[in-house]
Each structure stands twice: as C-alpha cells, then as structure tokens.
Image (cartoon, rainbow, N blue to C red):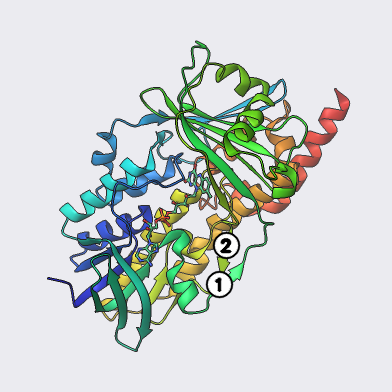
Amino acid sequence: QLPSSTDIAIIGAGPSGSVAAALLRQRGWQVCVLERQHFPRFSIGESLLPYCMEILKEAGLLQAVNEGDFQVKNGAAFTWGDRESVIDFRDKFTAGPGTTYQVERARFDHILIQEAERKGAQVWFGHTVNAITTAAEHATLSVSTDQDESYTLRARFVLDASGYGRVLPRLLDLEQPSDFPVREAWFTHIQDNISDPDFDREKIIIATHPQDRAIWMWLIPFSHGRCSIGVVGEPSHLAMNEREPLPFLQDMVNAIPRLRHLLANAQWDTPVRPLRGYSANVTSLYGERYALLGNAAEFLDPVFSSGVTIAMHSAKLATALVDKTLRGQAADWQKDFADALRVGIDTFRTYVAGWYNCSFQDVIYSKHINQDIRRMIAAILAGYAWDTSNPYVEKSERRLKALAEICGEAQLDT
Ligand code: FAD
C-alpha cells in the first residue's frame, strides 16, 4: 500500500538521506524515504573522510559499513612531477577517527539504506518526487512511481537529500550558481593490476598535471584489485573536444609519471563516464517545513573528497532541529543549521579555491611546512573542518594566504 502520510519524508536514499533516516528513527519518528532509482545503483564520490565515521557511528550505521569489506583509507598522497607529499590522517590536530574507507558507492549506499530500513524507515525505490506544496503545519509531495502510479504524501517535514537531482531548489526556485567556474570530470573503474610493492592502497592519489596545474587526477584504490580513476578540469583546459573518452583518459594517465608507472598493466574494462557543471549553490538551506541536505544544497568540488562528509554532517545537524521543530520546541535553523554547516563548507571552500589558484598546491608540495601546521591541515583534509579550535579552520583564508607566502619564499631560497 502506497504511503499517504508520515512524520518526515526524505527525498533520495544517498548517504545524506540514509543517515538522516537512521538518526530520525533513533528519535522515534516515522520516516518515509522516496528514491527515484533502484539500488544498488552507480554513484560517484568514493573516497570518504575519517570524520564521517563519527557520524556513521552516531547513526548506528558504522558496524554495517565496517563489515562491508571496503578498502581502508588513512590518507592522501599528492603527486606533481617528481614531487610527492603524503598527508596521513592519523597524525592530525583534531581528536577523532583517523581512518575511513574507499568505497564502491553502489554497494556502500545500498548498505546504508538497508540499515536505515532495518531501523524502521519505510523506503520506496522507483518513486520520483515531482512537486511540493508547503503549509504552516505540513508539506505535501506529489510522487510518481515507475509502475505508472501517482500519489501524494503528506509529511510534517521534508528533507531534500536528492543530490544532483536538486529537487526542492528547482521546485522552489532556490538555485544559485556556484562561485567556481564550470569544471568537468571523466572517470571509470579499472582492474588496476598494480604490482609496485611501494604502492600504498590505503591512500588515494591526487595527481597534479605536470604542465597544467588546473588539471588533476584521482586514483582511488578499492578492495579486490580495482580502482576508480578520473580527471578533473575546466573544459577549455582539458581540451577533450570530440575525442573518444577512453583514449582521452588513458592519455591523461600517461601524462602523469606516477600514474603511468602504476597503471602500466591496468585493464580498462568499464566505460568512461562524464559529469559536468556539478558545483552548485542555493539561496537558502531551509524554509517552511523543509531543509536541504548534502548535494541538494551545495556542492563545491571533488578535490578533497569532502562531498559525502558534508552531506552526512548536514543530515546530523538538520535531524536534531527537525526533532525540536516537530516537538514544538524552539529551533534556530539559521544558527544551528545554516550557519553551523557553513563553517565547514567555507573552510573547504578556502582550500578548494587555493587548490585551483595554486596557493594551496604550493603549501601541499612544499618541503617547508612545520609539523604542527601539517597536523592542522591534515585535520581539515580528514574532514574535521568544523573544529574551530583549529586556526586553519577559524581564519582559513588569512592563514592559507600567509602560509602560501612563506612556502613560496622558502622555495625561492632553496
Ligand atoms: P546522492 O548520493 O547524489 O543521492 C541522491 C539520491 O537522490 C540519488 O540516489 C537519486 O537517485 C535520488 N533522487 C534524485 N532526484 C530524485 C527525485 N526527484 N525523487 C526521488 N529521488 C531522487 N564526495 C566524496 O565524499 N568523496 C569523493 O571522492 C567524491 N568524488 C567526487 C567526484 C566527482 C567527479 C563529483 C562530481 C563528486 C564527488 N563527490 C565526492 C561528491 C559526492 O558525489 C556527493 O557529495 C555525494 O554523493 C552527496 O550525497 P547525497 O546524499 O547528497 O546525494
């Protein structure tokens, strides 16, 4: 029987939707998740950050993830020409987990939503949300199913976790362009056949293109000998033009010495996919009887693997306020959701902007950062971007600028 009313309707069963569903079930609310696709389904966003392990634990989802046989991750190895810089998340300023996983999202997202369902969330796959009306006490969603049925669902609160679907931003005219230029990514999965004994599968590789520092590639090792590989840049820099995606991506790999060496025997067995113009913003993160989670609200850039962590943190903050709102208690959505979430988003924004204007690349590839500062940077890259006791969170732009100048001068001296 199709649902007609619920306490909370969640649009989308990605990480933000599943974490929100699990946290709301813990508080005893009736939860209905509407997901357009059928799981398992492919999604990009495969490298997690250690901070999200804390949220998974809080939501009661960690054990299922730990049992998922995913590749452990403890850091990131940056490479540019003959330079290499390793950030180890276990040696960081902020307390908390120092390791996480590199995950095939089809399997990871399926595990999360199955766990949320086991905790009592009603989950409907093949159900697409097409419209919303909001009123003082409730919102009504118009839903169609892939069995050609249509129905309305009345909810006391709606959480939009629809990712790139951006359902409520589109329907409620909340969309706002990102500050970042349009970039695109081309990516695939491979059988990596990496035989180099020095290769550390517990770290993702982020590789700067030797000739064009605005282009970078990721290599994310999974368990069982497979990897995700992708390239990111502005279309005019990538200059892919009308080329076939596979040879284009292989040429990019071959331009980067470390990747060319590691992937010499790789088996390219999966089609290459593109994603363009993914960075997005909104005019407001919440409104009457609704709030936006994860990518449905804002997405910055893939370079520091912050997307899933921000998505989960948004679910954590919003569910605490939904609970208050539905209990009739005072809930300060601006302060405790929008402003609180922005702290970490703005921290990542500083470092993403610094990556592309090269100031942060200068820092990362410098041999001259002292150990304390390295630990502060490691904490942010491990996802602890809301820890305002970290000076590189609190005054991120000013600190990064000063640090980049020091690294630049030190490089000139040597
Ligand atoms: P999603 O995971 O996108 O889930 C949204 C769900 O909503 C989908 O299942 C969709 O089917 C459903 N939906 C959409 N519309 C509707 C509708 N109308 N009705 C019902 N359901 C609907 N992040 C990382 O953390 N690490 C990375 O390494 C990383 N790499 C990335 C690489 C690239 C190239 C890009 C573009 C992004 C990357 N990200 C990464 C970001 C990551 O993909 C997202 O931040 C993350 O998936 C957001 O999760 P979510 O729960 O908000 O949405």
**Can residue 15 be seen from the camera position used here?**
yes
- Quadrant in the rendering for residue 83: top right
Tell me residue 413's x, y (percent): 87, 26
Reading the chain from its start, which is encountered first: label 2 or label 1? 1
Q: Amino acid at mark 1?
A: Glu
Q: Secondary structure at mark 1?
A: strand
The answer to whether the residue labelled 2 contacts the one labelled 1, judged by CB atoms less than 8 Å apart, is: yes
**Residue 67 or residue 258, whichever sits in front:** 258
Q: Nearer the viewer, residue 259 or 315?
A: 259
361 on left or right of 108: right
Q: Which residue is mark 1?
A: 175
Q: Residues within 10 Å of mark 2 (few under 14, many from 20)?
A: many
Residue 28, image x, y percentages: 18, 65
Quarter holding residue 402: top right
Where does residue 203 sit, x and y in percent of width and height? 50, 28
Q: Quickly name the residue at label 2.
A: 280
Foreground: 142 or 7?
142
**Quick one: quadrant of the N terminus?**
bottom left
What residue is shown at x 34% (from left), y 61% (from top)? Answer: 12
**Three-letter amino acid code of the residue under disc 2:** Ala
The residue furthest right is: 413
Q: Residue furthest bottom?
A: 136
Q: Left or right: 188 with respect to 144?
A: right
Q: Describe residue 226's horizontal placement relative to residue 414 as left or right.
A: left
Q: Residue at x 33, y 62 (%)?
A: 36
Instruction: Classify the position of the C terminus by image quarter.
Output: top right
Viewer-proximal residue, 92 or 35? 35
